[in-house]
Amino acid sequence: SIASADMDLNQLEAFLTAQTKKQGGITSDQAAVIAKFWKNHRTQIHESLISQSRWDNGLRNMNWRVDLKAQLRHMDQINTPVAIVEMELGKNGQ
């Protein structure tokens, strides 16, 4: 819950306080350890979650062109521009 919400220190304190008051929740010592761990590793945890949740995190290549139709069955469709875009997506290192 803490990592998925990317809690700031105020939110963390409120969340941990609620967890200590809950039936079968955590102790105040456990809350202190969790708070210290989150303060020291928040950025790394957040970056790790973001990198794991992206399907493709980069545009590797892109090609595009505009074509004009020169010959068709129906005259009203001649010289109609058509854009063709090709994008290659991929993860870093792949």
Image (cartoon, grey):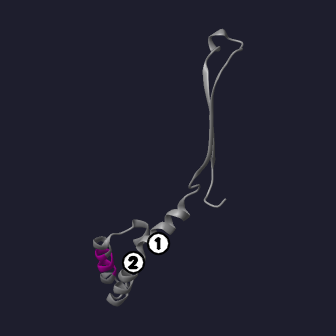
- Please give the residue where the numbered disc 1 appears in the rendered image: 45
- Please give the residue where the numbered disc 2 appears in the rendered image: 38
Q: Residues within 10 Å of mark 1 (few under 14, many from 20)?
A: some
Going by the numbered disc 1, the residue's amino acid type is: Ile
* Residue at position x 33%, y 79% in the image: 16
- Measure how far apart labels 1 and 2 are at the Cα level: 8 Å
* Residue at position x 35%, y 69% in the image: 7
Read off the magenta span: 13-19
Rendering coords of residue 93 (x, y %): 64, 61
Q: Mark 1 near mark 2, Cβ–Cβ under 8 Å? A: yes
Q: Nearer the viewer, residue 18 or 66?
A: 66
Mark count: 2
**Residue 8 - label:** none
* Residue at position x 69%, y 15% in the image: 70
Vertical position of residue 81 compared to residue 54: above or below: above
Q: Is residue 8 magenta?
A: no
Asked whether residue 22 appears in the rendered view, the answer is: yes
Rendering coords of residue 17 (x, y %): 29, 79
Q: Earlier in the sequence, mark 1 or mark 2?
A: 2
Q: Residues within 10 Å of mark 2 (few under 14, many from 20)?
A: many
Q: Quadrant of residue 27?
A: bottom left
Q: Nearer the viewer, residue 64 or 5?
A: 64
